[in-house]
Structures are given as C-alpha cells and as structure tokens.
Image (cartoon, grey):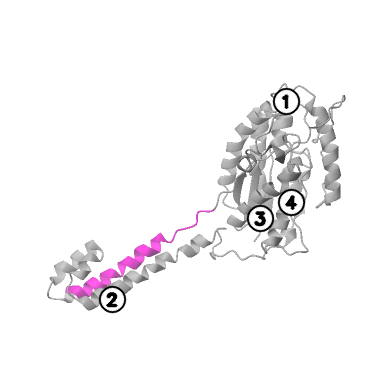
Amino acid sequence: MPKLQTSAPSSAGSQSAGSQSAPSRSASSRRLGVVFTHLTLGAAFGLTLGACGTDGGGLGTGGAVGAGGAPGTGGAVFGSGGATASGGSATTGGATSTGGAVGTGGLTSTGGAVSTGGAASTGGATSTGGAASTGGAASTGGASGTGGEGSGTCEAGTTQGNEVLFIGESFVALSSIPEETANLAKAAGALAQNESYVDVSVAGTWIGNGAGNSIPNQYRNNADGIRFVVMNGGGNDCWQGGGQQDRTNALNAATELFADMDENGVEKIVYHFYPDPINQTPGQYDNLKACLDLLRPDMKALCDAQVSPQCYWVDLRETWDGHPEYTGDGIHVDGPGNVPTATAIFEAMQENCVAP
C-alpha cells in the first residue's frame, strides 16, 4: 500500500518531452525506479479522482493477448489430387463392361463409380491418386509455421538479443518483465545465455501526446536493426488524459508507429495490454478502468488488422484474474507478478514465432 504524502507527485509522466531513454538498464537501477515511483504514486493516491485525466503517477497497467496467424491453407491441394481420379475413369471408360457413360458416372461420384467401372487395376491406380491427396495433408506443414513463416518452420536460436526491443511506460519500466522474458527465451533455446533483450521503456510516457520520449519515439530513436518489438501503451493516455480525443490520438499514433515499423523492416509485434486496475480504496481507479475498457477493443482491432508487421495481442486480464498479489499499488507489476506476466508474453511469442 503506497504511503500518502502531502505534496502532489511530479507523476511518472514527468519525463521531459525531449529526454532520451537509455537502450537498457540494470536490475538495480530498475529497483531504485520502483522505490521512487511507489513513493510518488503514494501521494497521487491521496488525491480525489475527479476524472480519468487527474494527475497520476506514471502508469503501468496492462492487458493483452496474442492471436496466432491463420495457418492452414492446404485444403486446395487436396482438391487437385482428387482430379487425378478422372485419369482412372478414362481407363474404365475403355472397359466395355460399363461403357463410357459409366466412366462419366465415375467422375460425378468421385471414386465410388471407379469401383463399379469393372477395371479393378485402374481402380487401384486411382487409389494411388487418392493417396496423392495426402499432399493436401502436407498442408499441415503450413500449419506448423505458427509464426506465419512461408517456410512452415520456426527455427529456435535465430534471433539475437539486440534485435528485440521492449518499449512502453512504467508497467514495463518499473518491472522485470523484459529480463524475465529473456530468461524464458534462454531456457527455450531462443536466446544465447550471454545475451538480453533491449529495454528502452520510460515511466510516465504516452502513445499519443507526441513527446520526445513517447512510446512511438522510443522505437524511432532505437529502430536500427530491430526485427521484433514487444510493447504496451495507452495507460497514461487514459490515466493522465482520459478523454475521447486522448484515445483517438493514441490510436492515430499507434497507426503511424506500425507504418514506421513496416518501413524499417520490423517483422512482428507483441502488444500486451493492461490487466484491470485493482481498487485499494473505493472507486480509486474507476475512471481509469472505464477509459481502458473503451481503448482496449479499438487498439486490439488495430493490432489484429496488421499484416506487415504482424501484430499479436496479449490481454493480461486473463493472466491477472484472481491474483491481487501480482501488484502492490493496484496498477503496476509487483514481485510475484513479474514471472506470470512475462510468461504470458513469451507464450505468445513462441506460438507465433516471434524472436525464435
């Protein structure tokens, strides 16, 4: 429970508009950031939330779910395999016992008539044609490409740590989510033991306000060589803003960000969206939750519609449901919540061949 203070906090969003974030941070500096932010948040909690746009600390709230690609398209191959049966019926047409008419009957019954064609040997031949339809089954090769890769494979250990970028606000910056996600990748053979992912998240930042250290600019300022992006955003647009225009600005900024990522060659995005905030006093986060509930489906629709780069949505409400111990202040990740949150993100990465 954050301690109350008599003076208003500078808010986690007090990062100057022109400040630049470091490409990574140590675990110790991250813990110092937690202490400072919790102290400043404590003062913010003492203020009355008149509207979603009250002065809050740098938010981190979360939520999101990664949807997979559309894998299987091999059914069409099966159809063409069936066509070879017409070759068999041509031979049965030659069989005088049933005549050419029976052969055309074989075409309409797709194989049943072949057995009545009387030419048993050609029936056998058509059965091998049917076996060719297992080529259609080979379409499961496409399905195995859970990442949407044309090769149908997802080879682990093909991504370097500096090709994966974490961006966001205090939900990421004050947590150990990037580190825990990297640990899971190492255990799965997707990341070398001496490497880590790049984390440039900054507490208090928005998607849609255009500040120098905004979430889109965190990417733009560190875009070189990045193939995969893991991100959140919109929490402070709701917490420090909260109006309809703030939500619209967030969606417009995200649209432009995805276009920039496409131009720069980013392959895939994992967008994790906030869990529901947990009120520690009656009504404490009601306005914040109302804003997030409006922004969530629109941001998900934007993510789901992305083709290049592909975007996978992770709704952290499912992970946090029934686990108040995952947060200390109702909105930020606390100690026990780091590994489950990172696990939900990494599972989406594995399912969709993100940073293999």
Judge from the rendering whether residue 1 lies leftward or rightward of residue 151; answer left or right.
Answer: right
**Residue 284, percent across and down?**
71, 26
For the residue pair 138 and 149, the one nearer the viewer reads as 138
Mark 4 or mark 2: name the one nearer the start of the chain.
2
Q: Where is residue 275 in the image (x, y as percent from the top left)?
A: 65, 38
| x and y percentages locating residue 351 in the rendered image | 58, 55
**Residue annotated with mark 1:** 281
Label 3 with label 1: CB-CB less than 8 Å: no
Tell me what residue is drawn at x 65 percent, y 30 percent: 289
Residue type at tag 2: Ala
Q: Element at badge 3?
A: loop
Gap in Å between the C-alphas at discs 1 and 2? 76 Å
Q: Distance between the residues labelled 4 and 2?
A: 58 Å
Reading the image, the residue beneath label 4 is: 178
Q: In the rendered structure, which disc, 2 or 3, sits on the residue that comes first in sequence?
A: 2
Residue 9 vertical position relative to residue 159 in the rendered view, above or below: above
> Three-letter amino acid code at disc 1?
Thr
Residue 226 seen in the figure: no
Q: Determine if the magenta segment contains residue 82.
A: yes
Label 4: how many residues lie within 10 Å, few (<14), some (14-19) or many (20+)?
many
Look at discs 4 and 1 and give the one toward the viewer: 1
- The kind of secondary structure element at disc 1 is loop
Give the mark nearest the N terminus, 3 or 1.
Answer: 3
Spatial CA distance of label 3 from label 1 is: 42 Å
Image height check: is 33 above or below 109?
A: above
Q: Which amino acid does label 4 sit on?
A: Pro
Q: Name the residue under label 3.
A: 266
Query: How many numbered marks appear?
Result: 4
235 inside magenta stretch = no
Q: Distance between the residues labelled 4 and 3?
A: 18 Å
Of marks 4 and 1, which one's residue comes earlier in the chain?
A: 4
Amino acid under disc 3:
Val
